[in-house]
Image: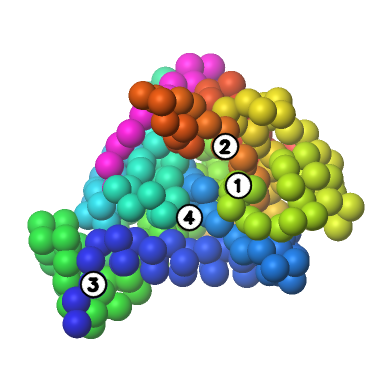
Amino acid sequence: MKRDAANIARNLTGKLWSNYLERVPCAKKYDEIVAQKGGHTVIDHLGFRTLNTHTGEQPEGIRAIKHIIKCLGYKPAEKYTFIKKKLTAVRFEHSDEMLPYIWVSQLEVDELPDWAQHLINEAVKDSGYALSNKGIELLNLLGRDGIITSEAADLLENELLKYFIRPWNIPEKEAVLKLNDISQYAAWVMLHGNAVSHFAASVNGQGVNEWPDFETTCNALKEKKIFSEVTIQGTPGSLLQQCATPAVKEELEVKDNGGRVFINWTYAYFELVQRGFTEENGKKLLFREFITEQERHLFYMTQTLDN
């Protein structure tokens, strides 16, 4: 039997989602409650963060993720710029509309102060490449032909899971703390690398009758302690409404004075999305894009003020 790129993309997303649920309790609780109420979780998108600088054997910035997901059938659809945050992002979408969007952002490292550039570049310059030669061969084969054997697909999926972690060595605590003062995004990527930064579930398709719209869903999740507060980006009936939890915190290992210590730091947040509709040639189409002003707010979900 053979499997195509869409099938592999679907399986990989599912495995990333399962790993994420083990680390983000509020998302796991949402998933369980929706299932108990007869609905199901529909993933709208997932996100990755990158550094636009030399990262050893791995491609820099958005290309670090793009060169993987393009072989899975994803194509860039829209570019977004966040000048004050020194960030650029791209929305990728798949021809199979049942697959989630992928949001990939990058920090423009060369726009940071010289000392910050130095800290980042020293930490990531010798990064290895997570895929084995066999994994690279299978990924290129899938990108070329759009289909590989089931056995090869299983191997490739397992290889790709290992890609979505931090590719460089454990960072220095002092470097993380200093970077956090000017860019919490930089500190986060130093700690987490290629890991998923968030998943977003779609209210459009969740199918819970007692939660008929975005507001009732968010308020119900607040009552169940999944959301500590509800700050909705976008108004009722608009093209895009979004709400997110603060990022869960984890104990992460860092280097300190020649030894190893743990610091408590943010990992991923969980987001809810409801999309409105546009009209084109008399047809109603689901709004596929993101709104820059709203996305700017969501970058703060991984901010930490405790360190």
Q: Return the residue nearer the eye: 5 or 267.
A: 5
**Percent x, y for residue 145?**
10, 61
Residue ID for mark 1: 204
Tell me how far mark 1 sits from mark 4, CA to CA. Answer: 26 Å
To which residue does mark 2 refer? Answer: 275
Q: Are marks 1 and 4 in contact (CB under 8 Å)?
A: no
Q: Secondary structure at mark 2?
A: strand
Q: Magenta residues? A: 74-86
Percent x, y of residue 293: 59, 21
Q: Residues within 10 Å of mark 1 (few under 14, many from 20)?
A: some
**Image location of residue 37, percent across then percent down:** 75, 67
**Mark 4: amino acid:** Ala
Q: From mark 1 to mark 2, how far is it between C-alphas?
A: 7 Å
Q: Nearer the viewer, mark 4 or mark 3?
A: 3
Q: Are marks 2 and 4 in contact (CB under 8 Å)?
A: no
The dot on residue 124 is none
Residue occupied by mark 3: 3
The quadrant the N terminus occupies is bottom left
The residue that mark 4 highlights is 195
- At label 2, which amino acid type do we have? Arg
Secondary element under disc 4, as helix, strand or loop, is loop
- Mark 3, other Cα within 10 Å: few <14 / some 14–19 / many ≥20: some
